[in-house]
Structure formats: structure tokens, C-alpha cells
Image (cartoon, rainbow, N blue to C red):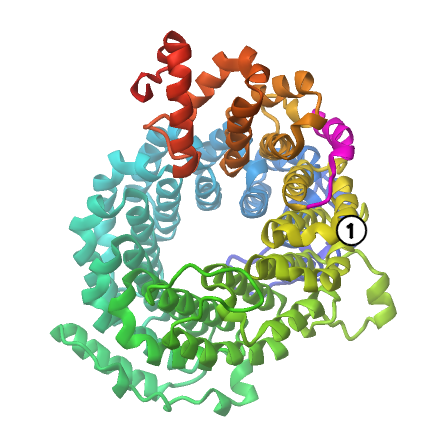
Amino acid sequence: MPIGTEEDSEDADDECPSRTAFRVIDELATSLPPSQVFPTLHNIVTQYMASSDPGQRKAALTSFAVTLEGCSEFIRPHMRQLWPLIDAGFADPHPVVRKAALSALGCTCEWLEEEVVDRHATILPVLLDMINNPDTQGAACTALDDFLEILGDTIAQYLPQLMERLSGLLDTAPNNVKGIVTGAIGSAAHAAKAGFLPYFEATMHRLQPFLVLTGEGSEQELRGIAMDTVGTLADAVGREHFRPYFQPVMNNAFEGMSLDSARLRECSYLIFGVMARVFEEEFAPYLDRVVPALIASCKQEEGGEDTAFAKELDELKKADKSGESVDVSKLDSESIDIEDVDEEKELAVNSAIAVEKEIAADTIGTVFMYTRSHFLPYVEPCVHELVDLLSHYYEGIRKSAVTSLFAVIQTFYELSSPVEWVPGSQVHVPLHQNVKDLVGHVMPEIFVMWETEDDKNVVANVCQSLSETLAKVGPGLAEQYMDTMVRFVTEILEGKALCQQDPDQDDEEADENEDQAEYDQVLISAASDLVAAFASILGQDFALLFGQLFPLISKYYSKNRSLSERTSTIGCMGEIISGMKGGVTPFTEEVFKLISQGFSDEDPEVRSNAAFAMGVLIENSDMDISGHYLTILTALRPYFVVAEGAPHAQFNAKDNATGCVARMLLKNSGSMPLDQVIPVFVGALPLKHDFLENRPVFRAIFHLFNTNPDALAPHVDHLLAVFSFVLDPQADDMIGDETRAELIRLVKVLGQRVPDKAKAVGLEAYL
């Protein structure tokens, strides 16, 4: 920390002592358990903020900023006590301290989004004021960019003022600040979505000159940021409004790709991904120019002169100028062999090229997902390159390659006109042979990579991508690989995967240590989600594995575990039960005991997950749990009292508690004191946060109207208003087609009994 008080050099890339000190703190925060880092740091930060030395105050705020990545979940419950430190930094008389406070805000936006958005009325005026001050203008614009990106619908009330201020800066600021402002405009569009339409045309007009800049340095950076922002605008306003700019922007992207800049090629690839997502099959005519460029990027080396890539890129440039297509099969797939890259070259990695390759690999999967059958001629060469990248030494490239390979499998499966899969250990609905061949080629390569993968983020990404693909493709994906997948996930849950090994820690210490770095917690959460995916595809047959995996998952719930682990454990249990259905019956008592602990957890997100998990346990277990109903209802009662302005998780918990009560009513309403339960249950409607719980809620309502209508009779007026709310044709769907159809039938019946009341709440169209 004393080194951090030294003055930073003006060059942001300079390895000055203060920046090196903060990098060390960052590494400590991401590598060690938060409890071993943040309490000590917090004491020093508090002490330094009280110092008369601006260097110490700068160091305090900067160290807090760099610690957030590794300690965010640990810090979250304490943010109310920490905000005064950042607020004091904003008001500090020294610009260096104010800039550090802005940096701290930007990091807080990234890692503690909800906590920042809740203070929008306080934060935004401060940022707008600092934008006007030349001493803090650049840092304030950067913080504003971070802030706007997470603001969501709340931005509507500020958008006119923001756009007036930001548009003015585009005319007057130097290039480096223009770039930051351009990014902030993109973040505003991202938050506002369709609400940005009134500013869209004028913004595109202002950005046009930036899209054709050809200079180096700040001009090149501004062009790249402008390209990124244009992509965000396209996402925000949608296909029809952006269509007039589609072809010109694609031309800008092709031109940028030809300027021998890794940064601009990266931006072009990002634009290709966005345009494919927005325009879908309309993007297909560009594939013969886009895909060869992506493949060429994936094949290049990062160190030294890459003559093979230069030759291939030159061929692509000529084709771009002539409008001709390029035959990807003629690109020399053997021109670059990753195995030939020696250790010195690996250490001398050109990070710009590596990031470009990472984006290119990721874009391949995105473009295939949205152009679908038009992309089929390119699948084979793309899969070949992506598989090669699985052994790349840069973890970002390996991560992108895995993501895209799973996207290719998912899309290939969707194009095979599949019949809906059936859960079970036996594959009742075989994969199309072409899909099976692709899976047979890709999955073993991913498992080879997984076996030797030493980066936790990459392994977590494999788990997440595999979970999503299993949910899409079903048991056919796991037919030959279930044992392998279970072995890998078991290693992670036991802390024995290669990426979890610490050469300085013996096995006994590892077993006793419940406190982990937050990166480890992300990995455990991803592995738990993969277990839930197993349950989804195996259904009741998952019971054979559940006995083996339950102890490994449940050990991550205890009062000494982190919030992330506790949330993940209880949430995962709910998803597992939903997947294995009645297969949970033999384990009901053990699972009930675990979930019950979550009811009294100090965090509302854990309590919310516990309410959902208990509901699906009651719904699916064949064991009679009605003897515990009063205990469960007593535990749930506080969920229904939520103060205005409470954290979002408390409102979500209320909806999940309502869903739990609904499942109890469906399973055994006779074991419940209906005169006490129904008023609370009905009073919690309509659900406004977790619409998935509307399914059991309305099933319970239909059940009660059919079996015990007198219990609902005193609440018909309120229920009619609820029905009107969820049937509103102007609102997003909240209940699904099946529930909607049954609800309309019920409304017709009630309309015959109380027509005036039904009409009074706007249900006349359904009578």
C-alpha cells in the first residue's frame, strides 16, 4: 500500500511501481479467499482515507477498486458502509483522488451492479458534474460508460440530458475523450434499447466520420470504439430501423479489416457477430467474405512476422476490393502448426493478435447460430480450426473455441429437424447421424483439453457451455460420454481437478479449508449447474448418480461457506429435483434437511432458492411431507412482508414462496389451514418478478376453483384484477399459452357469475 501512494506515470501502459503494487493486490484478491484479503485491506483503506496525504487517499480508493474482482460477493453485504468512502473521493479537492474514486465506481459497476443502480439518483449528477471539469473529464466519461451500461430502464428519465451533454462532447473533446464518450453513448443505447430511437439517426450521423478514420494511435482507437458503438445501436433499435445502415457498416468493417490493425480486425469481427444476430439470414450474402477472414485470423501466430497469415489476408483483401468470394478450402490449414510454437514465442505473445483470435473464434459460433443452413458449407473448416485452438496456450482463445464448438453442436442439432428428446439413461430419440458424427469428432477433443486444463475460468466455461448443450440436445449428447463427464465434475466438486491444485497446499489442508477464492466458487457453481443438467437429461434415472453426487454438493452449504456457494448449492438442488422428478423420493429426508437450512439463511437470494427447492421437492417426491407443512409455512411467512425499496432478491423470494405455497396446495391442500393461507397466497398476486412461478400458482388457483371454490369466494374481486393483469395484451407474456387458455376458460365461467365485476377490470374481451 505505501508503494501505491506514489505518483502514477502519465502513460497508462508504463510499469511504474504504484501500478505494479495494485496489480499485486489484484492478484492477491483473485487468488486468496476474500476473508484473508478484504478485512485487512479495509482497515488500511479506512486509515488511508483519513490521511491528509492525497497519495494515500488515491491508494485507498484504487486498492478498493482492484480488489472488487476477487472479493465482490464478500464485499456485497457491506457496500452500504463502504459507499461513504467513494462519496468522499468524489468530493476530494485533489483530482488524483477524484479520478481514483471514479475508477472505484467503474469497478463497482462491473461487479456489484444492483448496488450501484440503486444509487442512480446520487451518482449520475456527480458524474455529469465531473464531465465538465477538464481535470476529471476522461475518467468521468469512463465511469459514466460503465454506469450507463448497467442502468437499464432507469435511464429513461435521464436520457435527454445525457444525450445533450454527450453529443456536445463529440464536437469539442480531443480524440481520446471522444472515444470514451462514444462508448458511453453506446452504453446509453444498450440501457435504453428502443427508447434510444429518438436519438438514433442523429447519433449515426455524428459517428459516420469516425468510421472512416485511417490514422494510427488515437484515430485508430476512436474508429474501433465507434464500430463497437454502432453494433450496440443496431442491437438497441433493431433490424428495421438499422437496415439503411447495414451495408455501409459492413463496408466499413471490411475496410477496417484491411488496415493491418489487430484492433480494427477485432472490431470488424464483433460487428459481424452483431449484424448476424440482428439480421440473421439476411447476413448470409456476406458469409463468403466473412468466414475466410475469421478462419485466417484463427490460423495466425502471435509472435513475429506471420507470412502465412499475411499472404492469406492479402488474398482476402483483393477479394474484398473486387467483391469476389474466397474458397476457404484453399486456405492453407497446415501453414501454422501450434505445436511448432516454441516456448520463447509463447512467452513473447502479441496480446493484440491473441485477443483478435479470441474474438474471431467466438464470432464463428455466433454467425453460425444466426445464419443457420447458409453456414453449412463452412462448418467443416471452422470446426477444424476451432479444435486446433483447444490446445492454444492463451486461455481466452481456448475459452472462445469451446464456446463456439458447443454453439456449432447446438445449431447443427437444431438444423437436423429433431424430435423432442425424452429423459432417461437410454437414448429413446437418437441423434441424426450427421449430428452424431459431429459430436463424435468434437467431444473427445474437448475432453482431452479438459483433462489438462489448468485455468479455472476455462473449466467453468466448459461446464456452462456443456450444460446449455445438454439442455438443448438431450441424452444423445451424453450417450458415450456420461462416465467421463461425471468423473470430471466429481473431480471439481472434490477439489481435485488440475485447475484447483495448489502446489504449496497439502491434501489435508485442502480438505479442511472451507474458505475459497471467488474464482473457485464460480467453478463450483458451474460444476453444480452441470450436475443439474445431468438430472434434466436423465430424469428419474439420475437417482443412480444422485447418491454419489449429493454429498459432494451439499457440503458447500454451511454457515461458513460464501454467499456464492450457499446460493449455488440450494439453487442447484432445486434444479436437480426439477430434472429427476420422482427419482428424488429415496433422498427426500436428506434433501429436505438441506433445503430447510436455507430458509433461515441471512441472504434473501439463498432464501429465495430454498423456497423454490422446497416447492419442487413437495411437488415431485412420492413421500408424504404434509406433516412438515406447518413448519414450512411458518418459515415462509416472513417472505411475504417486503418493504418498498428492498433488494430485488427479497421480491424474488416472495414470488418463489408463493410458488412453494401453490405446490403445497396442489399436493395436499387438506393439510393446510386454508383460512390463514389463502389470504396471504392471493394477496401476493400478481407475481411481478419470477414469472416462471405463475405455472404452479395458476394450477393451484384452477385446482381450488374446481375442488374448493368457497375458499376463493371472498377473494374473487382481487383475483379478477390479477387475471386482467396477466392477460393484458399490451404486456409481455407472463403465463404461457397453456395456462392462458385455461385461464380464459375460467374467466368465461366467472363472467357468467359476476359479469359486472369482470367487465370493471377490463376482462370484457374474454367473456
Q: Position of residue 440 (x, y in %)?
A: 47, 79
Residue lying farthest top?
756
Above or below — where is 274 with respect to 485?
A: above
Position of 317 with respect to 222 (left or right) is left
Give the quadrant of residue 225.
bottom left
Position of 391 with respect to 737 (left or right) is right
- The residue beneath circle 1 is 35
Residue 485, magenta (yes or no): no
Q: Nearer the viewer, residue 219 or 118?
A: 118
Above or below — where is 262 with respect to 35?
A: below
The amino acid pointed to by label 1 is Ser
Q: Decide whether the magenta segment is chiefly helix, strand or loop.
A: helix
Above or below — where is 390 with respect to 472?
A: below
Q: Position of residue 378 (x, y in %)?
A: 29, 76
Q: Position of residue 684 (x, y in %)?
A: 57, 23
Above or below — where is 256 with respect to 176?
A: below
Residue ID at (44%, 33%): 128
- Quarter of the figure that contains the N terminus: bottom right
Q: Position of residue 65 (x, y in %)?
A: 62, 48
Residue ID at (26%, 81%): 328
Q: Secondary structure at mark 1?
A: helix
Q: Magenta segment range?
A: 622-638
- Viewer can see residue 703: yes
- Viewer can see residue 155: no
